[in-house]
Amino acid sequence: MRNFLIILVTAIVAGGAFYVLSEHWRHALGLEPYLLFLACPLMHLFIHRRHGQALSADEARQKKREHSAGCH
């Protein structure tokens, strides 16, 4: 059910974006630099999602010790 809702919302947003862009293409081109700037934090969130959460507490401590030993 959750996947269906995600697909439905994505389709609605894509349809709305298509309508807005087709009617206001010249105005939308002026927003390109800002959209690119806003894409950076979004990409960071999605790319680093759950980064390191699969480690147990002992593994995380060991990895931290190894990292700090290599830094000094």
Image (cartoon, rainbow, N blue to C red):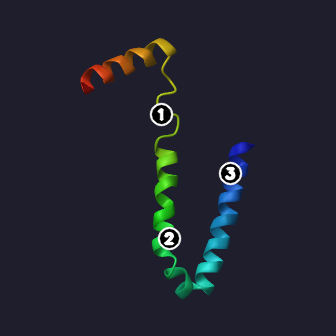
The image shows residue 6, relative to residue 39, as above or below, that is above
Label 1 SS: loop
Identified by mark 3, the residue type is: Ile
The image shows residue 34, relative to residue 72, as above or below, that is below
Q: Residue furthest top?
A: 58
41 vs 69, nearest the viewer: 69
4 vs 43, nearest the viewer: 43
Label 2 SS: helix
Q: Quadrant of residue 3?
A: top right
Among the two numbered marks 1 and 3 on one chain, the one whose residue lies closer to the N terminus: 3
The image shows residue 34, relative to residue 68, as above or below, that is below
Identified by mark 2, the residue type is: Tyr
User: Where's residue 18, x and y in %?
Assistant: 61, 75
Task: State which quarter of the image contains the C terminus.
Answer: top left
Marks 1 and 3, how far apart at CA: 23 Å
Q: Residues within 10 Å of mark 3 (few under 14, many from 20)?
A: few
Residue located beneath label 1 in the image = 51
Q: Quadrant of residue 67?
A: top left
Among the two numbered marks 2 and 1 on one chain, the one whose residue lies closer to the N terminus: 2
| Residue positioned 52% across, 46% down in the render | 45
| Residue positioned 39% across, 14% down in the render | 62
| Residue positioned 35% across, 17% down in the render | 65
Identified by mark 1, the residue type is: His
User: Where's residue 8, x and y in %?
Assistant: 71, 57
Marks 3 and 2, how far apart at CA: 25 Å
Relative horizontal placement of residue 15, taking residue 56 as reference (left or right): right
Please tell me whether mark 2 or mark 1 is closer to you in this view. Answer: 2
Q: Residues within 10 Å of mark 1 (few under 14, many from 20)?
A: few
